[in-house]
Amino acid sequence: METYDAQQTGVFFAFFAAMFIPIMIVSVIILIAYWKIFEKAGKPGWAAIVPIYNIIVLLEIVGKPLWWILLLIFPCTSFFIGIWLINLLSKSFGQSEGFTLGLIFLPFVFFPLLGFGNYQYIGPAGAGFARNDTYDPSINYKDPLNPPQA
């Protein structure tokens, strides 16, 4: 039978505290950034701290229907839908897929950039896909090689 002394217990708690404190600081920074993102999108900032309601508000921000919350419940689909929601969030603020990768892999940097930066909410990114609005490049096209004669 093994015996444990106070030194082993102290090392465990020191390691736990060394990992717990930075994780909590980063979590609070991301939560505050979420609050600002919700406010920029015209939603109440406090909605970011309410567990299920924040997903509902995020679905409203990106323009997806409420039944998508069911897709987030199941483990097989939640990973892909979560990434898709983050992509639609960055699109709702006019950003590209590169910014989406930043939100996924460096959330402690890119969520505060989105919340506190000069990025403006331009509307739900998913709404255009739901209405089948497609981009037509022929609208307002100006030929750079043959300008119109006045």
Image (cartoon, rainbow, N blue to C red):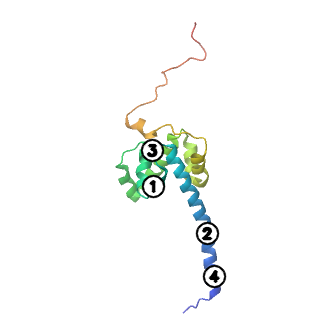
Q: Is residue 52 above or below residue 134?
A: below
Quarter-of-image position of residue 72: bottom left
Query: On the image, numbered disc 3 is attached to which residue?
Result: 61
Which of the two labelled residues, at mark 2 and mark 1, occupies the earlier sequence position?
2
Q: Is residue 31 above or below residue 133?
A: below
Q: Is residue 97 above or below residue 77?
A: above
Query: On the image, numbered disc 2 is attached to which residue?
Result: 19
Residue at (63, 74) in percent of width and height = 15
* Image coordinates for residue 87, horizontal then vertical, percent: 50, 45
Amino acid type of the residue tagged 1 in the rendering: Phe
Q: Which mark is residue 10?
A: 4
Viewer-nearest residue: 40 or 18: 40
Q: Quadrant of the C terminus?
A: top right
Mark 2 or mark 1, whichever is nearer to me: 2
Q: Do the numbered discs 2 and 1 sit on residues whose CB atoms are within 8 Å?
A: no
Question: For mark 3, does the 10 Å Cα neighbourhood hold few (<14), some (14 to 19), or many (20 or more) residues?
Answer: many
Amino acid type of the residue tagged 4 in the rendering: Gly
Which of the two labelled residues, at mark 3 and mark 4, occupies the earlier sequence position?
4
Residue at (51, 46) in percent of width and height = 39
Mark 2 or mark 3, whichever is nearer to me: 3
Q: Which element carries disc 1, helix, strand or loop?
A: helix
Amino acid type of the residue tagged 3 in the rendering: Ile
In the image as oriented, which residue stretches furthest toward the bottom? 1
Q: Which element carries disc 3, helix, strand or loop?
A: helix
Instruction: Answer with left or right where residue 12 lies relative to residue 44.
Output: right
Per the model, the C-alpha gap separating discs 4 and 1 is 37 Å
Which of the two labelled residues, at mark 3 and mark 1, occupies the earlier sequence position?
3
Instruction: Answer with left or right where residue 51 lies relative to residue 13.
Output: left
Q: Which mark is residue 79?
A: 1
